[in-house]
Amino acid sequence: MAPESPSRPKRAGAAAKRPSASDIAPEGTTPASGRRGSKYTAVLDDDTLDAFEQLTRVARRRLGRHVDKVEIFSTLVLLAADDVSLRDQLISAVGGRETHR
């Protein structure tokens, strides 16, 4: 087997523990494991964009520091993945939306 390139970290297997929302560092956006993140583009409707920006503003006020939108997004994903009730709410809401394809 060829050695791994030092610029590409080895990916964790399926049996690896998924980080919970409590494992998120409060500051910064670089994963603690040193893994590179993936870049996504989201096209949000006006109502969703307003809600996302409001959520970010509230977090900034309450924490008293700059909060990146990627922190909000990442935390929401990890919370939904870690909490069965929240995950079920998310899936129900997605299932109830009209598809735009």
Image (tube, rainbow, N blue to C red):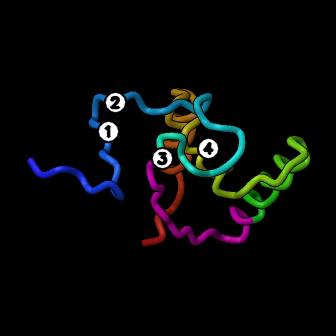
Calculate the distance from the C-alpha at mark 3 to the C-alpha at mark 4: 21 Å
Q: Is residue 84 magenta?
A: no
* Secondary structure character of the magenta stretch overall: loop
Choose the circle earlier in sequence order: 3 or 2: 2
The percent coordinates of residue 77 (x first, y second) are: 55, 44
Are the residues flagged by discs 2 and 4 in contact, CB closer than 8 Å?
no
- Cα separation between marks 4 and 1: 22 Å
- What kind of residue is marked 2? Ala
Q: Which residue is mark 2?
A: 16
Q: Position of residue 96 (x, y in %)?
A: 52, 51
Front position among marks 1 and 3: 3
In the displayed structure, would residue 65 be above or below residue 17? below
Q: Horizontal placement of 6 versus 50: left or right?
A: left
The percent coordinates of residue 62 (x first, y second) are 89, 42
Residue, x 65% and y 37% (percent of image)?
A: 25
Which numbered mark, 2 or 4, is in the foreground of this view?
A: 2
Residues at discs 2 and 1 in contact (Cβ within 8 Å)? yes
Front position among marks 3 and 2: 3
Label 3 sits on a secondary structure element that is loop
Q: Which residue is mark 1?
A: 12
When the figure is inspected, residue 38 is found, relative to residue 81, above or below; the finding is below
Q: Earlier in the sequence, mark 2 or mark 4?
A: 2
Location of residue 43 (image quadrant): bottom right
Marks 2/1: CA distance? 6 Å
Q: Is residue 40 magenta?
A: yes
